[in-house]
Image (tube, grey):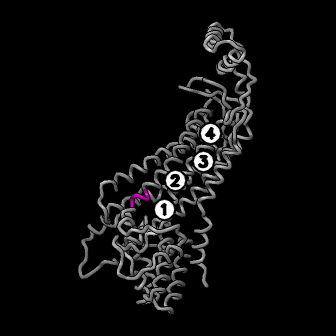
Amino acid sequence: MKLWEKDFEINSEIERFTVGRDREMDLYLAPYDVLGSMAHITMLQSIGLLGNEELPVLLKELRTIYEQCQKGEFTIEEGIEDVHSQVELMLTRKLGDMGKKIHSGRSRNDQVLLDLKLFTRHQLQLVAEAVKDLFEQLIQKSNQYKDVLMPGYTHLQVAMPSSFGLWFGAYAESLCDDMLFLQAAYRMTNRNPLGSAAGYGSSFPLNRQMTTDLLGFDTMDYNVVYAQMGRGKTERNVAFALATIAGTMAKLAFDACLFNSQNFGFVKLPKECTTGSSIMPHKKNPDVFELIRAKSNKLQALPQQVTLIMNNLPCGYFRDLQIIKEVFLPAFDELLDCLRMTAYIINRIEVNTHILDDSRYDPMFSVEEVNRLAAEGIPFRDAYKKVGLDIEAGKFVPNKDIHHTHEGSIGNLCNDRIEALMSETFRQFGFERVEQAEQALLNEE
């Protein structure tokens, strides 16, 4: 079934090529297509394009289709072009010509725009919740091991004293910044394109504010041409938000792989969270972090993929945009899997509390000694030279009792402030309003 079909049949090879993976990708969008149709027909009834007695019948059937989507029972039949066609076909089979009325005032262009916005909005909520869960695991570990010192590195050389409080807490605060990116992406996503039709509006007196309110959007994409131009741009902006989270996880995974190795021995993964070697019986490999690192690095390429597909297109709709779905829609599942697995492993990671028993790390206290001498009145450069010469002569004896007090240092992590920042950023998403709007559509009156 093709919504645009007339009195000729398209070449089968052309159809295969142009449909591509749309049936597969549209399964991601199915429940959101139904939600959008429910809001749209409610609006159509309010402007007289749908009868009062028709609306409850259509809504009831759409709720049934939505339940099928939620149960994983919804399919797009062979020969059906996309999710929009499948939903309309199911309604028409059940309700006859009444089912054909749901497309008034819409184009597949604004229909898929809406589906993508609703899908992305929901996925961003899941990502935000998963980021917050990982954040909480990192903060908990930071507080638990705040007094356990470890070497800090520059150039992969032992540098200055750090702590597990700082290490875990650094990644927690990084996620706070990532959450700000995510919130900006959510704000740009949470705008209603419905009513823009093919990108130039409709002669029907559509009530776009009504569908905006029914679907829980913050506002709408006002200009109908811009609404269509937003296709691709929305995905690119969201992809940048996903990529910044992936960047934090990739760096954390690299650290964990390094620190888990025998040459470092700073952390240890539970044996049940490692894999073995087919030839070396002693191996316990951190494959989970290696795969998190690889998948996170792959996700960081997503903005460039989206950009290269849509970057040289003028305004208006083009079929090129279909290909974005293939890289964009599955990305959420991959990121969510990495976030949840990282949180799982961080919760179970074991910390070596006796790293500094090894004398190879003694030089990291050299700056502490220079600062102590400077505080006693010795010029800093003279203190620096004295400590350097003592190290070269093998006479340096470190004082490991250190006291850092300024904000964000070993002795003053500011984790309470970091937690407050994350909490406030998460609150500002306003997920409750969206959930209430969607439930109001789905609940029978």
Dominant SS in magenta: helix
Residue 283 place in picture, x, y as percent: 60, 34
Badge 4: how crowded within 10 Å, few (<14), some, or many (20+)? Answer: some
Q: Which amino acid is tagged 4?
A: Ala
| Mark number displayed over residue 189 | 1
Marks 4 and 3 sit apart, C-alpha to C-alpha, by 10 Å
What residue does disc 3 label?
Answer: 176
Q: Which amino acid is tagged 1?
A: Thr
The reply to whether callout 3 and callout 2 are in contact (CB within 8 Å) is no
Q: Residue at x 39, y 59 (%)?
A: 232
What residue does disc 4 label?
Answer: 170
Q: Relative to 39, say whether 369 is above or below.
A: above
The reply to whether callout 4 and callout 3 are in contact (CB within 8 Å) is no
Q: Nearer the viewer, mark 2 or mark 1?
A: 1
The mark total stands at 4
Location of residue 381 (image quadrant): top right
Query: 404 or 242: nearer the eye?
Result: 404
Marks 1 and 3 sit apart, C-alpha to C-alpha, by 20 Å
Marks 4 and 1 sit apart, C-alpha to C-alpha, by 29 Å
Label 4 vs 1, first from the N-terminus: 4
Secondary structure beneath label 2 = helix
Badge 2: how crowded within 10 Å, few (<14), some, or many (20+)? Answer: some
| Mark number displayed over residue 334 | 2
Decide if residue 352 is in sight here: no
Marks 2 and 1 sit apart, C-alpha to C-alpha, by 20 Å
Marks 2 and 4 sit apart, C-alpha to C-alpha, by 24 Å
Label 2 vs 1, first from the N-terminus: 1
Label 3 vs 2, first from the N-terminus: 3
Q: Which residues are magenta?
A: 231-235
Left or right? Give the position of 243 relative to 171.
Answer: left
